[in-house]
Amino acid sequence: MPWQRWKKSIALALTAVLLPGCSGTNRNVSYLGDAELNYYKNASLTTEYAAVDQATPLDIVNSDRPRTIRDRTQDEIWDLSLMESIHMSIANNKMIRTRAQFLAQSQLLVNPALAPSIYDPALRQTGFLFGTRGVEAALADFDTQFTSSMLWGRNETIANSSFGTSPLFGLSQETGNFNAALQKTMANGGTVTLSHNMNYLGTNQPFTTYPSSYTGSANINYTLPLWGGSGVEYTRIAGPSGGGLGAITGVSQGVVIARINEDIALADFENSVINMVKDVEDLYWDLYLAYRQYDADVANRDSSLRSWREVKARMEVGATGGNAAAEAQARENYFDTRARVENSLASIYDLENQFRRLIGLGVNDGRIIRPADSPVEGEYLVNWETSLTEALVRRVELRRQKWQIKSLELQTIAAKSLTNPQLNFVSQYGLNAFGNKLISEQTSNYNSAYGTMKDRDLENWTLGFQLSMPIGFRQAYAQLRNIELQLTKARAALATQEQDISHELASAIQRLETAFVTARTNLDRRIASARRVEATQAEYEAGVRDATLDLVLRAQASQALAEIALFTSLVNYNKAINDLNYRKGTILDNSNITLGEGEWTYEAQQQALQKAWARSYAFRNPLLKASPEDFSSPVPYPKTDLTWQGINGDDGLIPQPAPAGGAIPPAPGMEQPVAPVVPPQDETP
């Protein structure tokens, strides 16, 4: 039967198709010519190395081998001052280094993209992703957008029509569409759109006035938010209403928030520099102490060697006090002091290597660094009230937190605006075009499309309002509540930070006083130990009955310990001064380090000057808000003198601003005095 033959043919065809796939990859395949096997890999996740063309710095390649205590190379002494060291660390380090990173899985080695560097402020300024946008990216929301398209087409079909000689005829249409638009978002959140379109239609359809015709329009649209998400204040905080990703980005995508984020990035960068400078000075004094300890150990070793030689000489001639036990004790004491010298030398090499890393130098350039400055020995007097005021004003962590609070305050304003219905004013005016030709000198009978538009024969306009609102505003109120809670937490964190800083400052002052008193006591101890060595040595040499070699060796060891204790106290005293300046936030000022922004380009300065002249000659409009409120303080350090009045009758541990009569006097050029800063209160939104 025919169906049986078809069935067999289908079965054979399926077998022919499926058989190669089922036979696996063991088929014999033949190729033309000879070739080598170059493209086969037996693993896909092998360790590979990126082809990065970047030369290793010369100070690393040309560095000599590190110093060791067995290396007797006489290196050149490089007497380096503290200020030179600090400025060298600033100049050489593009990536901010700290002492704690050495010999550890630091962020610089594990994840260098998150390590602090000199590029961080610029990276924040040029950020473009949501949540990390800089000012330029935020201003891009107000850039004019241009869109345009030009499309041509042809369509041929059969028209099912009863007109003409035949009920069916071929219908042909040729089309052309041109669209162009300019859209600009204004600072008040409004949107202006200029659009123009022109459409061409050529057809053979019967009973048409023109076989080819042009239609189009030129329109101007203006939409302005009037209620929720409206106004200049909302737009500069949250960005244009309806832009971005909506609830994902929240109300933190405006120009002002981006500018505050840049200030926070600057504070983070400054804090990193402060930590590096503090580590440089601390390590400088540790290296100084290592040299002093080495000198003391060398002096103790030399004394032990002399004592051993004297005892050995007495033993050889059979003099009193020259027995074998005394000689063995002197010998053992010498090797003990010698080991101390070796350890001290190793400590110098280790600290010098760490110091070189911290100031951005190679391992060994033929010079060995030796601190040229001596520690401060005079008493450093500290005024508690002045130091506390400086700490509460100049600590970078507080400045950063205050910027965070200001950002949340502004976001609260924008979030409150979104709890209102979205009411928009919409308007549109346009001129329509129609003509047999696109452009023609004859404008009668709609001969020219642009002619009808020019003569304003065909107009259109729209005017009205649009209202939209979610019933309940649950998402808007949730966002507002969340930001208010963040603000409350931020204010509580600021108060706690200020309290912690006061305790840090108190601890720094206590350590400073302890180090100074201890250094003065250790100075007396060193004088007494030197007298002890002289007296014990003289009695031993004179053969006094109770004067033994053991007492002489003990006195020499005690003198070395007293010498080391004195310089340890002096170094701790200078490190305590450095820590005090660190807790006060004045460490960069003491090192003559300032952070500054580069000047604007000449074109930007000229444009700003022109706008300043335009505003100066403009007429004042009392109904117009010419400039928004400042979100930054007009004075560098907005903090008043502190008194000791407690909050709500507390124990007075938290310093309070001066009374209203003690306001800061106006700075030059300021019209109004700055009111005293009111401390944040814990309020439940």
Image (spheres, grey):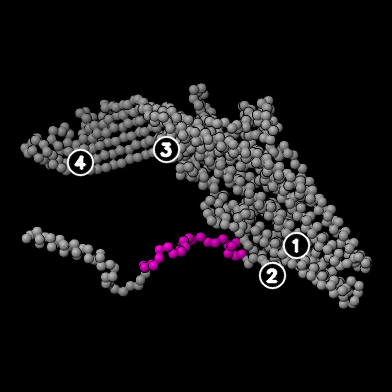
Q: Percent x, y for residue 48?
A: 45, 63
Tell me which residue sits at (70%, 48%) in the image.
578
Residue beneath disc 2: 70
Q: Nearer the viewer, mark 4 or mark 1?
A: 1
Q: Nearer the viewer, mark 3 or mark 4?
A: 3
Magenta residues, start to end: 39-63
Amino acid type at circle 2 is Arg
Front residue of 480/54: it is: 480
Distance from label 4 to label 2 (Cα)? 93 Å
Distance from label 3 to label 1 (Cα)? 66 Å
Circle nearer the N terminus (3, 4): 4
Distance from label 2 to label 1 (Cα)? 16 Å
Is residue 73 visible in the rendered image? The answer is no
Tell me which residue sits at (69%, 64%) in the image.
346
Circle 4 SS class:
strand
Residue beneath disc 3: 246
Tell me which residue sits at (24%, 34%) in the image.
215
Residue beneath disc 4: 174
Circle nearer the N terminus (3, 1): 3
Residue that lies at the very extreme toward the top in this rendered image: 622
Front residue of 545/55: it is: 545
Q: Percent x, y for residue 139?
A: 46, 38
**362 drawn magenta:** no
